[in-house]
Amino acid sequence: MAENRDAVLADFQACTGIDDFGEAILYLEETNWDLLAAINKAMPRGTQQLPSEMAPDIEMIEEIKATPRSASSSKIQTPQSSRKIAIKAADATSAESAKPGTSRPKSCMRNRTLTFHINYLDNVHKINLSELSTLRDLKQFIWHKTSVAPCQQHLRGWKKEPQGLHTTLQTLDLPRENTLYLSSFSQDGDLAHETKPNVSRSSVSVSGRMTQTYTLNVKDEVHNETYKLKFPGTRTVLEVKTDVYSLTDVPVRNQQWKGWPSSLKDDNVVLAQSGICYPEHDLSVGMLPAKEEKKKVVDLIDSDSSIDEPEDAEEFEDASEPFNVEDDIFIDDVKSTKVERLMPENVVDEIMGTLHFAEQFEKRYGPAHPEFFAGTFEDALKESCLKPAKERKLLAVYLHHDNSVLANVFCTQLLGFETVLQLLSANFIVWGWDITYESNKERFLYSVTQTLGTVGSLAISGIDVDTLPVLMIIMRSRSNTEIFTIVHGNVGVNELLTNLVQAVDIFQEQRRADIGVEEERQARERVKQEQDRAYQESLAADRAKEEAKQMQEELEKKQKEQAENERLAEEARKEAHRQAVESSLPPEPQQGAGDGVMKVRVRLPAGKFLERKFQPDTPLQTLFNFLIVEGYPTEEYKLLSSWPRRDLTSMDSKLTLMELKFCPQETVILEER
């Protein structure tokens, strides 16, 4: 829908000549984007012409040889011009070449519709616009699409750079399809997002951009290569240029950059504040052109010739600068052809060193070379020898020395041989290093000592320079990583192939054995893991049973302790009650205490008897208390009379023995309840 409206807007502006973006939108909004209705509303009826009223199709134009100044002045339009005049002015601008030709009537002249693909913040916005529109109109459309104000818009990718906001798109010789890259910047160089009213856009703070990672697509115009480099937002522009120097070998002072924001004036600005696009930004770097020094020629024979001659005028063009005649005679401006090393001196970062090595190797010896591994020596060792047996490869370390006469032949004839390249590609990881400088040699020996030990370091340090370069083959055998062989540079292609094939055969045989051992070890480990898992499960089950048993025992113990405590408490209560009853029990009457003393015998459940004397007026409760003192409480026992058989414990305990008609010698029975 947005694309259709863009096309309608472009057609409306082309037909009415209304350049003002807001006014055109207003007409279309009032007519609900009906093109014909909007045109009829914008153009009065008197100004619309029928086809029969139009001028002839052929119009003669007088040829005018205009100077640039007059041509530029012809583009100026007066504000008082009507909309229809604006259309004719646009047509006149398109005919700026001022040559004879044909012209269609202005009111119905068909112009091209240009399509612009605006890339901004990982989004592509499509805009259709008439070629009679100006750059200002395009920026208004972009503002409507991206919420970036026109004053903050920086467009890149023009075929022909526009000179100003009033430049007509028709004058830029644009194709129908155009791709432009939009970036937004403010005066201080930071990315700025100026939004229109009622449009919300999250703005990224400077501190947030500091933590972002920027991807710089740097095109090396010197070597025709492109690097995709990632830097944090805290990296300065100068540090980026220094890092690029290690890749392109073009010093910072000689670098010529394209793509940095125009507001960037200081190389000490960090990337987060430089105004570059996030997450990716395209740059190109080249070398500043060398100053052309005119070779001074001194003609010793015709030195007296007049300086008025044209040749002499050219010869003494730079006569204002002091020079020495003798130097001009013997000095020839011939550039030095010093051979650049495959590696700079004092390499600290092995990764950058290997990248520089691979680049310079291809630059010097051509594209026919092994694919060199980019990384440290330790990383190359892990990638080749320290992987599982099925993924393992041989490691071929190529050591280069520029002072060896064998280097050029070895690199071009041996390493560039097709069979050698195929063999290396299929079975080897190739890692290259330049030991021309002693500092780089010491660095390599240190890495070898850290990974292979002193034996490997001694084997390398003993190599004679005259036999360099060498191809050192490292193999892992029986859990040991060691140097298998060293192929010196004074060999032929056949001997090199023989050494490589022999190494591959031994390696393949050893790898098959290692694969078998590894599979057996993995099988044993699987069995062991299953046994361990079963043992752990059994152990967990036993532990759970033991815990359940302990919990049950603890519960029973607590229950027993509780029951025992309750029993002891009950016994203590009974004892306290017994003692209280015993203290209130009247003394037993003596035998001669008088007439009427009753002797009561109590037959116990075990068959034994208790005897005690009571007065006739003794209440029945006293008899109960006597039994309580003897350990037979009425709560647990009941007392029965033999004749008549009665349950005395269910009777009133205040009744006396006489009232109960006890005999002088009465026998009662005690039973458990």
Image (cartoon, helix red, strand yellow):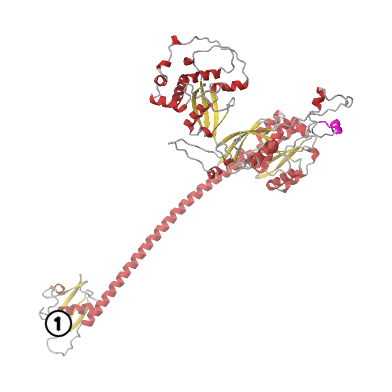
- Graded by Cα atoms within 10 Å as few (under 14), some (14 to 19) or many (20 or more), the crowding at tag 1 reads some
* Horizontal side of residue 198 vs 484, given as left or right: left
Location of residue 361 by image quarter: top right
Reply above or below: 347 against 588. Answer: above
Secondary-structure class at tag 1: loop
Q: Is residue 430 visible?
A: no
Q: Is residue 126 visible?
A: yes
Q: Nearer the viewer, residue 457 or 474?
A: 457
Residue drawn at x 45%, y 20% is: 16
Q: Which range is magenta?
A: 325-332
* Horizontal side of residue 629 vs 350, given as left or right: left
Q: Residue furthest right?
A: 301
Amino acid tagged 1: Thr
Determine the main secondary structure of the stretch shown in magenta. helix
Reply above or below: 624 against 396. Answer: below
Q: Nearer the viewer, residue 174 or 377?
A: 174
Residue drawn at x 21%, y 78% is: 627
The image shows residue 568 at horizontal and vertical percentages of: 31, 72
Which quadrant of the rendered structure holds the N terminus?
A: top left
Location of residue 663 by image quarter: bottom left
The image shows residue 647 at horizontal and vertical percentages of: 14, 72
Would residue 473 be counted in the magenta stretch? no
Which quadrant of the rendered structure holds the C terminus?
A: bottom left
Q: Which residue is mark 1?
A: 618
Q: Residue furthest front?
A: 80
